Image (cartoon, rainbow, N blue to C red):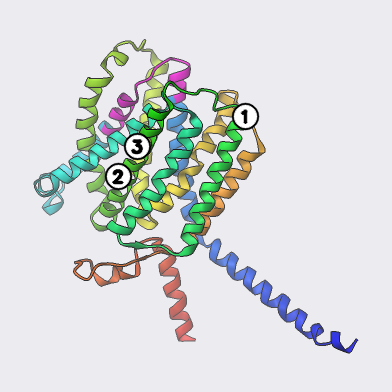
Amino acid sequence: MEAASPAGPGAPGAASALGSLLRGLRGRLFTWDILKTIALGQMLSLCICGTAITSQYLAEKYKVNAPMLQSFINYCLLFLFYTVMLAFQSGGDNLLCILKRKWWKYILLGLADVEANYLIVRAYQYTTLTSVQLLDCFGIPVLMALSWFILYARYRVIHFIAVAVCLLGVGTMVGADILAGREDNSGSDVLIGDILVLLGASLYAVSNVCEEYVVKKLSRQEFLGMVGLFGTLISGIQLLIVEYKDIASIQWDWKIALLFVAFALCMFCLYSFMPLVIKVTSATSVNLGILTADLYSLFFGLFLFGYKFSGLYILSFTIIMLGFILYCSTPTRTAEPAESSVPPITSIGIDNLGLKLEETLQEIHSAAL
């Protein structure tokens, strides 16, 4: 009986320590900055969902398959809005000044962005939905590697764990698709389709890393204006080469035109809002957040296309969101090279900027106490 007496006073202390740990964990994982990042990421997912639903309606109900035409309309909107805006700016941010200095760089960026969109959509003709969903995640490790070498991002162990959790959620979603029979279409040539997905995912990673660099070091308007300009030129040329027969065979009516407009508006919103989200987080965290886009498409498909529901979809959504929260809970740091001309203030890192400011304020408050 006497041996048990020391545990008595210790139990409240252990419970208090556990409660304090849980409160601290909750305060770190569910801050206002993280909740705002989650909301912004899901807004992007809904935009991607809108493009998927409209594309599926065009393909299944009206037998229209013109991905390059859909992208061309989006690039035209970017050109009319952001490129024209650059043309009327003064000083070094003017369109002509940017073209004189960096025209060839933005041609490569526009080419990567256009072909990434085209290859992923074209892959659905050759391989299965399951393969596209799985192999499309290849872009995330490519993106992290490019961010490491180009943006000098330095990740912590929790970031790799968070990415693994998100990919586990994607695997759960694919398993639910298999059980629901959504992978029945085996495609005409699976190997070609899989290669197209890997190439498209890699080009997406290149485009996203360039976007993060331009948005954080230059301006959002410059990125969108240049993508609008060269995206319109490149997609227009490719449209005339590969899709002129498909476009000529379309039986146009107001419903088909409305679906094209809806797709273009969703893409325009996606391109316009993504730089804003990347500016306060990173390209990697944005790509983790939009993994839920396929799930939103599925939920809409339950009512629009008669998809079968599975509880695994809810589990998949939960796992992906958990991994996304874990990734955002800890900021990365940036290791700028010694010869870099970047101001010293960026040496603390540019990923999850809101979290860094919060940590800095906490450190100042602790020092004051």
- For label 3, the residue is 200
Circle 2 SS class? helix
Residue 320 visible here: yes
Query: Which stretch appears magenta?
Result: 56-75
Nearest the camera: 312 or 30?
Answer: 312
Say the numbered circle drawn on residue 207: 2
Count of marks overlaid on the render: 3
How far is the residue under mark 1 from the one under mark 3?
Answer: 27 Å
Circle 1 SS class? helix
Name the N-terminal-most of marks 1 and 3.
1
- Give the residue at x 19% y 67%: 341
Q: Position of residue 56 (x, y in %)?
A: 46, 24
Nearest the camera: 194 or 179?
Answer: 194
Residue 60 drawn in magenta: yes
Q: Position of residue 162 (x, y in %)?
A: 51, 56
Say the numbered circle drawn on residue 180: 1
Amino acid beneath label 2: Ser
